[in-house]
Image (cartoon, helix red, strand yellow):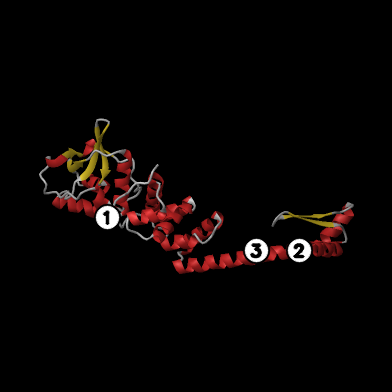
Amino acid sequence: MSRRALGKGLDALIPEVKRDVVPGRGNIVELDIEQIAANPYQPRTRMNEASLEDLKESISERGVLQPVIVRKKAGRYELVAGERRLRAAKLAKLETIPALIKQVSDSEALEIALVENLQREDLNPIDEARGYNELIKRFNLTQEELARKIAKDRSTIANVLRLLKLPEEVKAGLEDDRITMGHARALLGLSEEKHIRSIYRTVLHRGMSVRQVEALVRRKLKAKKRRARLVPQIVSELGHIEEELMRKLGTRVKIISQGGHGKIEIEYYSNDDLTRILEVIG
């Protein structure tokens, strides 16, 4: 797919339309809320309930100040942008909602929905990361190109995208606000999933701060480096270690090393010999 521009943001894609426009003029109509199907390209999987309740109260008092955007598809209307307004209007028990009808393709519908959500501050980091990733894949963009299109630093986008490398349970914790972005970034300093999951569970159990997690990760990394330095030394001394074991056990010993792991074979020649070796080992 060739690269295409996303514009400078949602305003470049969707001209702002206020509620005081006469309904029905210029493709703005009052639609039955039940006629509007959900947007299949909606990147937001969770919404802040308190924020949604505030919007519901505002709509109950003042009405919907800006129309949602829909498109006609398969004989009905499909939401393109305005997921929060639509949900809040349903909570406010409105029967209709002002809607701007636009004829857009599937790709344009995805683009509008993603950019609208990415410009909101309350989008959770995992949904934000999924949104960036979808834009990059769908429109064949580099991180730098995407940064220019949505007016963010490339480093910010790169850091958010890294969150997708976290284990699923950690991503769920970030979505549910059990940990913060700072905790998640600290955990990404570890390369092995089992270690990330282990420290994540420790964070939840102890209620650790971001600084405490960063310090714990640093200690883990230092310990890993120490072990990495010891392995070559141990491998180089395997012959000497075999000799020491044979001297202490009084029998043939063979160490089989296989790249950081292996086994030790200890020979015995009778039941009495085995008993003797076990006594030596203790």
Q: Which residue is mark 3?
A: 228
Residue at disc 3, secondary structure: helix
- The quarter of the picture where the C terminus appears is bottom right
Residue 11 placed where, x, y %? 24, 52
Q: Quadrant of residue 235?
A: bottom right
Q: Nearer the viewer, residue 196 or 16?
A: 16
- How many angstroms separate mark 1 from mark 2 (CA)? 63 Å
CA gap, disc 1 to disc 3?
Answer: 49 Å
Q: Nearer the viewer, mark 1 or mark 3?
A: 3
The x, y position of residue 121, in whole percent, is: 31, 58
Residue at 52% across / 57% down in the picture? 196
Residue bearing the label numbered 1: 51
Q: Is residue 32 above or below residue 54?
A: above
- Mark 2 closeness class: few <14, some 14–19, many ≥20 residues within 10 Å: few
Q: Please report whichever mark, 3 or 2, sits nearer to the chain's N-terminal start.
A: 3
Residue 28 visible here: no
Mark 3 to mark 2 CA distance (whole Å): 14 Å
- Relative to 78, 17 lies left or right: left
Q: Is residue 107 left or right of residue 162?
A: left
**Residue 21 at x, y = what percent?**
11, 47
Q: Please tell me whether mark 2 sits on a helix, a strand or a loop.
A: helix
Q: Secondary structure at mark 1?
A: helix
Quarter of the rendering occupied by the N terminus: top left
Q: Is residue 23 above or below residue 193?
A: above
**Residue in the picture at 27% in, 55% down:** 51
Which residue position holds label 2?
Answer: 236
Tell which circle, 1 or 2, labels the residue nearer the N-terminal end. 1
The spot of residue 85 in percent (x, y) is 23, 48
- The three-letter amino acid code for the residue at tag 3 is Ala
| Amino acid tagged 2 | Ser
Going by the image, does 267 lie left or right of 199?
A: right
